[in-house]
Amino acid sequence: MVSAYVALGANLGDAAATVRWAIERLALLPKTTLLACSSLYRSDPVDAVGPDFINAVVALRTALSAIGLLGELQGLEQLAGRERPYHHAPRTLDLDLLLYGNDQIESPGLSVPHPRMLQRAFVLLPLAEIAPHRVVAAQLQAVQSQRINRLERQAHAGMPDAGPRCCMGALS
Ligand code: ADP
Ligand code: MG
């Protein structure tokens, strides 16, 4: 079993509902347990166009291979109706594999750690919330000019039964 971290982002339609839906689906992946999920965050589009993004990061424990997990993530993107009309297009759902244990993977369809994760506040802040040991202060400092707001817990706890059962504590 391996600890893996997945970043979620959406900026089309009801983006918060899509992210919550995706977290519920990640909890149901085969050979996989959802260990923790961050708050939801709102951020400006970075390397993308369109409305603000809703972002989150989850921690999984999985017996899937990294490629197998990526395949499941892409399946969920498809289920959410993601199309790729052009590079950096607005997206109903983007799921990126940030970390897979301590593995370093460079293959044509998969790079881990995710090559752009250190440039993105919308990845580093939610990751630091659930896995502070995987982010260092200098990395957070380097992205501090990027606008990102943690949504009030109220904003995503208000819908009965809509949220996943998440453990919010840090992972050791
Ligand atoms: P991005 O997330 O960078 O905006 P896409 O979601 O369209 O772009 O992903 C493009 C490709 O990135 C996918 O076809 C996938 O194979 C590849 N990819 C490489 N490494 C990863 C990773 N760690 N997580 C998710 N996708 C990845
Ligand atoms: Mg992606």
Image (tube, rainbow, N blue to C red):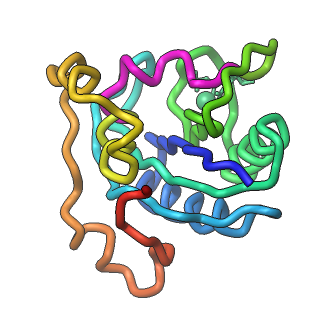
Magenta residue span: 111-122
Question: Where the C terminus falls, by quadrant?
Answer: bottom left
Q: Is residue 120 magenta?
A: yes
Which residue is at a point 19% across and 44% down the rendered structure image?
A: 149
Which residue is at a point 47% across and 85% down the rendered structure image?
A: 161
- Give residue 170's position: percent from left, percent from top: 36, 59
- Give residue 8's position: percent from left, percent from top: 51, 44
For this view, does 132 lie left or right of residue 73? left
- Give residue 12's position: percent from left, percent from top: 48, 43
Q: Which one is in front, 46 or 168?
A: 168
- Give residue 81's position: percent from left, percent from top: 69, 47
> In the rendered image, is residue 119 in sight?
yes
Which residue is at a point 53% across and 53% down the rendered structure image?
A: 59
> In the rendered image, is residue 54 in sight?
no
Q: Which one is in front, 109 or 22?
A: 109
Question: Where the N terminus falls, by quadrant?
Answer: bottom right
In this rendering, the count of numbered labels is 0
For this view, does 31 lie left or right of residue 13? right
